[in-house]
Amino acid sequence: MSRTGLILRANLGSGEISEERIDPRLPGGYVGGRGLGAKILSDETDPRSDPLAPEMRVVFAAGPLSGTGAPTSGRFSASFKSPLTGLLTDSNCGGFFGPWIKRAGYDAIVVQGRAEAPSYLAVSDEGSDIRDAGDLWGMLTGETNRTLEERHAGKVATIGPAGERGALISNVIVNGRRALGRGGLGALMGSKNLKAVVVSGRMKVEVEDPKSFDIAAARARSLIRARLSRGWGLAEVGTASIFHLLNVSGMLPVKNFQESRWPAQRAEEVGGERLRRDILSGRHGCAACPVACGHWATLPGGEVKKAPEFETIWSFGPNLDSSDLPSIVRAGALCDDLGLDTISTGSTIAAAAELRDMGKMEGGPGWDDPAGTLDTIKKIGMMEGGGRMLAGGARRLALGRGAPEASMDSKGLELPGYDPRGAKGMGLAYATSNRGGCHMKGYTVLHELTGKAERLSSVGKAQLVMGVQDETAFVDSLVLCRFVQQLLGPEILVDLYNGATGSDIRREDMMEMGGRIFNLERLYNERAGVSEDSLPGRLLADMVGDGPSKGNVVELAEMLAEYRTLRGWAPGGEILEETLRRYGLSR
């Protein structure tokens, strides 16, 4: 159980809303969440179709742990074909929306078609309908969230002006402070005239084996409490707690990956300790989460904003060579208001700054230009003036200026704030991620920073990356929070799944299920014509100039050859037929 067994379908073009029962043979192989979304897209959409075509689906999927008592299970997944990259993409989000999908009576919500006028989808256990959003169109995300929460007493996922206007680096903001980031989901919803989805309901989420589930959940909570009692930077300052460790390790990209660490004094101006001392003013968390890693920030003058995550601090800080922390906070909050992905936005602005240095662009923000950055974010979000050029992401911008080397991306998705020349596993993970330049689908950093794997060595990284990717695909399908994935370990993850669903899988089954999901995504992208596994040339050829990672590049070719062999792929990256048969897949 812990599945409702139902999918809600909404066709915005015809106005039809229907329910269907999930094939009982399906969830066991694809779990839920990310896996279920990938399966629906693979079965129902042509990988060669335009991502913005009306027939393309968006799948909002809960997992077997969503809405249960499992700690950190307040999450869900959105799956779609990315208008930014053309890849099958999923985005994982916390808050309260995921459990409310289950409370409304569904495992997933599938949206297709294009409404004639701005609309939103209201989903409830008492009935669902497509409603007029004329009064919401043009609103910032926070205002939309407040309006729909009051109107429906539900949880809201909404786009902002950036998505309405088709910015390819736009995202979806959930509960007013969490993001379905990466890949341009906001643009896809905007193309459908879909302003928001709001879910409400009071159905109780049951598990199949309450006794076994409660034992596993208690063990999980105990491990989390023990970690909190020893002082956990994640709870104290959020993901910014990793900032200084990355910098002193020579893994913090500076000025569009031209350098890999910042002077200590500048790092101290924006790192976790400065946040805690001068700006943080309260905490907030997601459903069923004892960690509560989200924070509020009070700026000089009393202005209260959501405190930035590490990636936002990096993207508008070191990556733009700015140590103006209040402006970094404002930049992240402005992106949320407009519905822009902070990694892609900051990285695209960094590419523009480098293009200006190269004489390939005129005007726009330069390095260490907080005011110019804020102005540019507004222009991107509103698709005005020079912002329109940047709204398509770094790769399109750099290619259009005849300097592709200025784009720090993989497969069209801008890289996050970890320089893989200082952690070789992350280089391979970036290159092989099914959604492009992404750390969350193969987060080897914790292994490499803690000494479990030698960070400056390529040896053994193929096996490490594949294992982390497959386990992560399973966790993203449960759906459970990534930050506790390694803390809980495979045994508890399996026990939670078994208790919730009445299954009897083992660790090797979990990895097999994760591998099936990963290869299904790969197959979809292969059919879409995307099979590259690459990194920017800078990371392959330009040695780090100084610091702990001095003299290093990413030896991608040798790691990739071993990785493809382990995966059961051809030397060119295509999935071998025997591997497809192993996972029950076919071209």
Image (cartoon, helix red, strand yellow):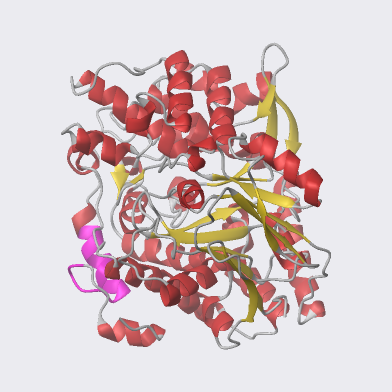
Image-based side of 258 in relation to 142, left or right: left
Q: Over which residues does the magenta segment extend?
A: 558-572
76 relative to 361, above or below: below
* Quarter assignment of residue 236: top right
Residue 359, x across and y down, in percent: 18, 19
Q: Nearer the viewer, residue 269 or 177?
A: 177
415 relative to 476, above or below: above
- Residue depicted at x 38% and y 61%: 465
What is the quadrant of the N terminus in the image? bottom right
Residue 42, x across and y down, in percent: 42, 73
Residue 476, x across and y down, in percent: 55, 63
- Residue depicted at x 36% and y 55%: 429
297 relative to 43, above or below: above
* Magenta segment includes 46: no
* Magenta segment includes 567: yes
- Residue depicted at x 25% and y 20%: 356
Image-based side of 573 in relation to 276, left or right: left
- The answer to whether residue 514 of the structure is visible from this angle is no
Q: Nearer the viewer, residue 549 or 358?
A: 358
Residue 218, x across and y down, in percent: 78, 65
What is the quadrant of the C terminus in the image? bottom left
* Quarter assignment of residue 414: top left
